């Protein structure tokens, strides 16, 4: 049975306590609502824990594009890249892939870029407000990030491509001599070239961020329980979530923020919600003499290295698979080989391993809005590679919806009903 307190009336129930659900819960409690987070995470830690910590404002073009499609063959795991498709799980990602192809049409990419640019422009101010609210301004480090290449060919192609790209509110520049020397002194391989981005940054420590969100939420009277929401129905014009032990809760507002798990719930509530698990991997170990470098993207290796407090994390891979299929140990092995080749501190120490899934919709835009099928049901999921970056602004927007205020941004591009048009594959 769930904690008896949970059955007590709450203004809002938030399904999912990852970074999106936690940011939403905090925004609702800030607005005076009593909140309950229901999260079913057990041993496996979700993407909100395992991500690279990068505030990635430089990526306003959704990955649903002709450019991404053209680049895909050269990025496959089989040829040394990060992109992989678990063939045994084709039933989980095949229908999603058909929708993805549709979303790669130039018009769709253009409107997707406009929508994502709008969200990303508001992301940094929302983060500044959130860390102030958490009384932990040091959680946000706005020190940009570096991107480097090891071969001259990759450097020439990469630099040309980034220079031509829309980098939104982030600004690209050449590495300063000091930056280049500092980074080079940490590495065992010579760098061919690199660039620096200003205006981006990182979360100082994602574990501490999640713990702080939880702590502040509780300090405002919010609760969090372990449990699985299996269904959301409508009773007397209100959304009522039912838990796996049969308990039905009766709040005014339900927010679905369950990452990949949101798909099944939303479909049971009558929505078309084709969210797929795009799984990523990391290895982590002591930071050694890495210093306080900002996140570094080793583009030829499709790997990002981020320092969190006294730990260093190397993350990579985009693996289309069922959420609960076994991890592929070859991916951790490859990360270890990269760490060794680069001479990272990670190569000299015991590392921990992690695998988890980005929640991704076919057009690489999140779903944020109010259900037109069930009164009081709000959703916020599908934040793909940008969930950490967009969590603070998503919390603000969901807070507006729940508290009956007009959201500060136009949410129509993020309406889940967009998938009801065209193919009904989910
Ligand atoms: C390797 C990797 C690196 C990444 N790096 C970055 C980065 O640098 N910057 C960035 O911005 N983003 C990054 N991301 C993406 C980011 O981590 C995700 O977009 C984000 O964490 C999604 O958060 P979420 O809260 O929606 O989902 P999750 O983190 O998956 O959390 C959802 C929670 O809901 C729970 N849940 C699901 N269904 C139910 C249910 N029915 N009942 C109860 N609970 C439920 C789950 O157990 C889970 O705890 C990365 C992702 C990966 C995998």
Image (tube, rainbow, N blue to C red):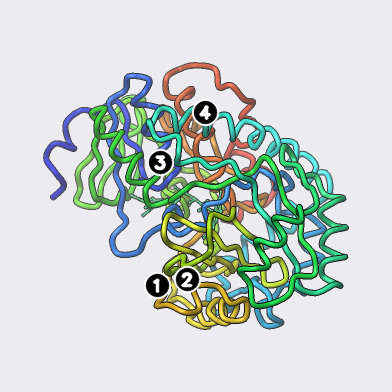
Q: Secondary structure at mark 3?
A: helix
Of labels 4 and 1, the one closer to you:
1
Q: State the separation of the CA atoms marked 3 and 1.
A: 26 Å
Is residue 251 visible in this depiction of the protein? yes
Do tag 2 and tag 3 residues touch (Cβ < 8 Å)?
no
Which quadrant of the structure image shows residue 170?
top right
Q: CA distance from mark 3 to mark 4?
A: 12 Å
Q: Nearer the viewer, residue 193 or 92?
A: 193
Residue mark closest to the camera, 2 vs 3: 2
Of callouts 2 and 1, the N-terminal one: 2
**Other residues around mark 3 within 10 Å, as few (<14) / some (14–19) / many (≥20):** many
Task: Give SS at disc 1.
Answer: strand
Work out whether 232 lies above or below 309.
Answer: above
The image shows residue 369 at horizontal and vertical percentages of 53, 32
How far from the left and from the top, in percent, is residue 327? 45, 76
Marks 2 and 1 sit apart, C-alpha to C-alpha, by: 6 Å
Rendered view: 47 above or below 319: above
Q: Is residue 218 left or right of residue 330?
A: left
Label 3 sits on residue: 21
Residue that carries the numbered disc 2 in the rendered image: 283
In the picture, measured across the screen, residue 346 lies left or right of residue 166, that is left
Pointer 4 residue: 397
């Amino acid at each position: 049975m769930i904690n008896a307190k949970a059955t007590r009336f709450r203004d809002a129930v938030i399904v999912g306590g990852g970074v999106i659900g936690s940011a939403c819960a905090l925004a609702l409690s800030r607005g005076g609502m009593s909140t309950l987070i229901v999260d079913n995470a057990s041993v496996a830690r979700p993407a909100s824990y395992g991500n690279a910590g990068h505030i990635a404002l430089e990526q306003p073009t959704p990955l649903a594009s002709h450019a991404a499609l053209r680049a895909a063959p050269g990025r496959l795991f089989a040829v040394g890249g990060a992109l992989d498709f678990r063939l045994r799980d084709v039933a989980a990602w095949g229908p999603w892939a058909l929708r993805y192809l549709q979303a790669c049409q130039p018009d769709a990419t253009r409107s997707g870029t406009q929508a994502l640019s709008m969200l990303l422009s508001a992301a940094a101010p929302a983060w500044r407000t959130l860390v102030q609210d958490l009384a932990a301004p040091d959680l946000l480090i706005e020190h940009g990030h570096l991107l480097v290449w090891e071969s001259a060919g990759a450097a020439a192609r990469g630099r040309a491509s980034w220079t031509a790209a829309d980098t939104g509110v982030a600004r690209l520049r050449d590495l300063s001599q000091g930056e280049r020397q500092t980074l080079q002194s940490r590495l065992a391989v010579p760098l061919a070239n690199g660039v620096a981005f200003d205006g981006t940054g990182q979360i100082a420590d994602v574990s501490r961020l999640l713990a702080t969100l939880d702590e502040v939420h509780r300090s405002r009277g919010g609760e969090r329980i372990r449990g699985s929401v299996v269904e959301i129905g409508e009773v007397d014009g209100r959304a009522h979530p039912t838990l796996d032990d049969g308990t039905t809760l009766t709040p005014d507002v339900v927010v679905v923020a369950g990452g990949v798990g949101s798909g099944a719930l939303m479909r049971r509530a009558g929505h078309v919600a084709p969210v797929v698990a795009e799984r990523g991997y990391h290895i982590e170990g002591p930071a050694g003499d890495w210093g306080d470098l900002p996140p570094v993207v080793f583009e030829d290796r499709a790997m990002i290295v981020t320092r969190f407090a006294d730990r260093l994390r190397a993350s990579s891979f985009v693996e289309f698979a069922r959420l609960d299929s076994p991890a592929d140990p070859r991916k951790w092995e490859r990360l270890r080989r990269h760490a060794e080749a680069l001479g990272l501190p990670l190569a000299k120490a015991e590392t921990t391993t992690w695998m988890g899934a980005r929640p991704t919709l076919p057009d690489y835009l999140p779903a944020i809005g109010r259900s037109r099928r069930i009164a009081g049901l709000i959703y916020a999921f599908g934040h793909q590679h940008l969930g950490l970056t967009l969590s603070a602004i998503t919390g603000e927007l969901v807070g507006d919806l729940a508290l009956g205020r007009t959201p500060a941004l136009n949410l129509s591009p993020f309406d889940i009903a967009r998938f009801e048009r065209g193919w009904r594959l989910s």
